[in-house]
Image (tube, rainbow, N blue to C red):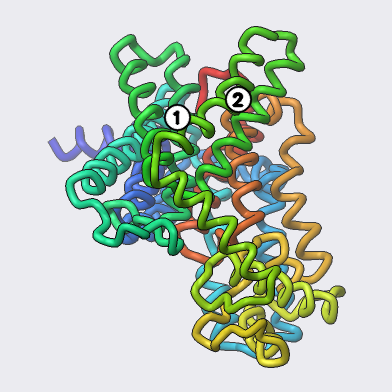
Amino acid sequence: MRAFLANRWQQIYRQGVLSQHLLLLACVAGVAGLLASRALVALSPVVGVLAVLANPRMRRELPQWLHNGAAGRMALLYILLLISALYTDNWPEWRHQVFRQLPFIGVPLAFCLAVPLTNRQRFRVGCSFVLGVGMVAAATLLDYIVHPPTDQHFYMVGKSQPAITGIFHIHFGIMLVLSAFFGLLLGRSKYAPQLLRLVLWLAAAISVVTLHVLAYRTGLMLFYITLFVNALRILFARRFTLGILALGLFVAVPFASYRLLPSVRDRAIATRYDIEHFYNGEDINNFSLSKRLAAWHTARAVARQHLLVGVGPADAQDAMMAQYRRHSYGLLPPNWVMIHNQYLHYLVASGLPGLFVWLLVLLGPLTQPTQRRNPYVYHFLLILGAGMLVDSLLEMQIGFNLFVFLYGFLVVATERSGYSTVNLP
């Protein structure tokens, strides 16, 4: 019996089944961790590395990792952090960031060197994300309906309801947008039977409804940017009827939402009022967008003084606080917020080289035909790339995990295997 089991395990190892299933486990743990458990998110890269070690052809696959442009661009972000050791002043934070940003190396490594997932397995991982976000969205929406905010001016004062699992509202809004568009795409897959197709589209619809009813400002902005870009792509493809329909939705849905949903109307009014406070020179201590505008101006002042190499990723917060002390825009110290723009953050932290590498990470994949033809890749890059104009998503752990996991699962794996069909996530 022992000999049989030993032979069976050897067979599973030699055929690459163990490596492949460990990578699948890492992906499922990553999805579950994003939605509910930070412990699973932390475990996911570890399982991914085990999947690499379990690949019997790992040495033969090494050239793929070394020649994978997407993995290389992610590694450059980590190298920028290591180089900053030459001029950083905040050594405890630098050491923390060296450990925290290891997934820049580990996650692409897993998707390059482990036995790749089959098309059906990738489809199932995509479904787990869409259905998981849909379930969290439905539960959050139900909780909002059963326990509405007691403050009748909840949205007027810039508040937002987090997901029922505790996900911060900005990241949850981004997940809702990803779920909406990925759900539509996955529903068209040849691997989706009729019932699953309907469930996926239902999850996508729930994500869109939740986005509007709870009036997630960042999520709504990304949803309509993506809808508009898709409408233009459809029109350029000479599918005029569908393109005009998409443009009609782009105009009609926000108009109807403004008229029918008090939360959307209050959020729109509050947004304008918030921005006017900054430009009118009024007190902005209780206004989130105004504080963000102040942070951008502060970051620009810091960046202008350190364009060549930046202040160092570990020193960005110290440099921002020092600039606030010189010009605070009337903000009290507890309201001195960080940059809230990933592009500006890299410019402050690593100077022009950092901004260049970051743009290379986002735009480099679009130079490859297989990446451009993969709708999952360009939706991911568009949604996250636009989202990082208004928030430094990589500076919070959940945003970092979301970006790194999806970049590995979609961009790195697509470059490795040449996935280009719309049937694949």
- The answer to which image quadrant residue 247 occupies is top right
Foreground: 16 or 257? 257
Please, is residue 394 above or below residue 128 in the view? below
User: Which residue shows up at 66% across the image and 54% down it?
Assistant: 389
- The answer to which image quadrant residue 345 occupies is bottom right
Query: Residue 199 location in percent, x, y?
Result: 31, 21
> Marks 1 and 2: CB-CB under 8 Å?
yes
Please, is residue 252 above or below residue 58 in the view? above
User: Tag 1: residue type?
Assistant: Arg
- The answer to which image quadrant residue 245 occupies is top right
Give the left or right position of residue 245, taking residue 262 as reference: right
Q: Which mark is residue 29?
A: none
User: Tag 2: residue type?
Assistant: Tyr
Query: Residue 370 location in percent, x, y?
Result: 70, 26
Foreground: 204 or 350? 204
SS of the residue under disc 1: helix
Label 2 packing within 10 angstroms: few (<14), some (14-19), many (20+): some
Q: Which mark is residue 122?
A: 1
User: Which residue shows up at 19% across the image and 52% down it?
Assistant: 147
Tell me the quadrant of the picture where the N terminus can be found. top left
User: What residue would you read off at disc 2?
Assistant: 419
SS of the residue under disc 2: loop
